[in-house]
């Protein structure tokens, strides 16, 4: 991300990042505690693919919006 990208993000009032992180880690642990190592790897791979697909989709939408402006 460039500095310009970071300027588009605004703080979320009342968001406790540390508490959010701990809650999410606990949730992930509960979802994966009975999985094998291979199952956890596959889950992570799929999550990574969804993440990057979402980033690319958002980037395309932003570029399209900037082109129309």
Image: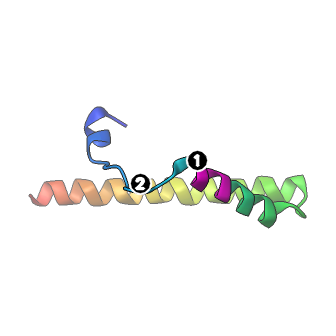
Within 10 Å of disc 2 (Cα), the crowding (few <14, some 14-19, many 20+) is few
> Closest to the observer: 48 or 31?
31
- Where is residue 46? Give x, y as percent: 66, 59
Q: Looking at this view, name the residue that lies furthest to the top.
A: 3
In the foreground, 27 or 40: 27
Tell me which numbered mark, 2 or 1, is placed earlier along the sequence: 1
Q: Residue at x 34, y 53 (%)?
A: 59
Residue 18: image tag: 1
In the visual, does 58 lie left or right of 62?
Answer: right
**Residue hosting label 2:** 56
Q: Residue 10 versus residue 46: which sits nearer the camera?
A: 10
Decide: is 36 above or below 18: below
Q: Residue furthest front?
A: 14
Taking depth in this image into account, of 65 and 3 the one nearest to the observer is: 3
15 relative position to 6: left or right? right
Crowding near pointer 1: few (<14 within 10 Å), some, many (20+)? few
Looking at the rendering, the stretch of residues picked out in magenta corresponds to: 19-24
Magenta stretch: includes residue 66: no
The dominant secondary structure in magenta is helix
Quarter of the C terminus within the rendering = bottom left
Report how far apart the C-alphas of labels 2 and 1 lie in the structure: 27 Å
SS type, badge 2: helix
Disc 1, SS: helix
The residue at 35%/49% (across/down) is 11
Q: Is residue 28 above or below residue 8?
A: below
Q: Say left or right for 42 vs 21.
A: right
- Residue 66 percent location from the top left of the image: 16, 54
In the displayed structure image, the side of residue 37 where residue 2 appears, left or right = left
């Amino acid at each position: 991300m460039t500095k310009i990208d970071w300027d588009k993000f605004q703080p979320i009032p009342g968001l406790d990042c540390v508490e959010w992180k701990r809650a999410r880690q606990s949730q992930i642990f509960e979802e994966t505690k009975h999985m094998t190592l291979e199952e956890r790897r596959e889950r992570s791979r799929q999550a990574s693919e969804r993440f990057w697909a979402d980033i690319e989709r958002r980037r395309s939408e932003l570029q399209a919006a900037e082109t129309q402006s």
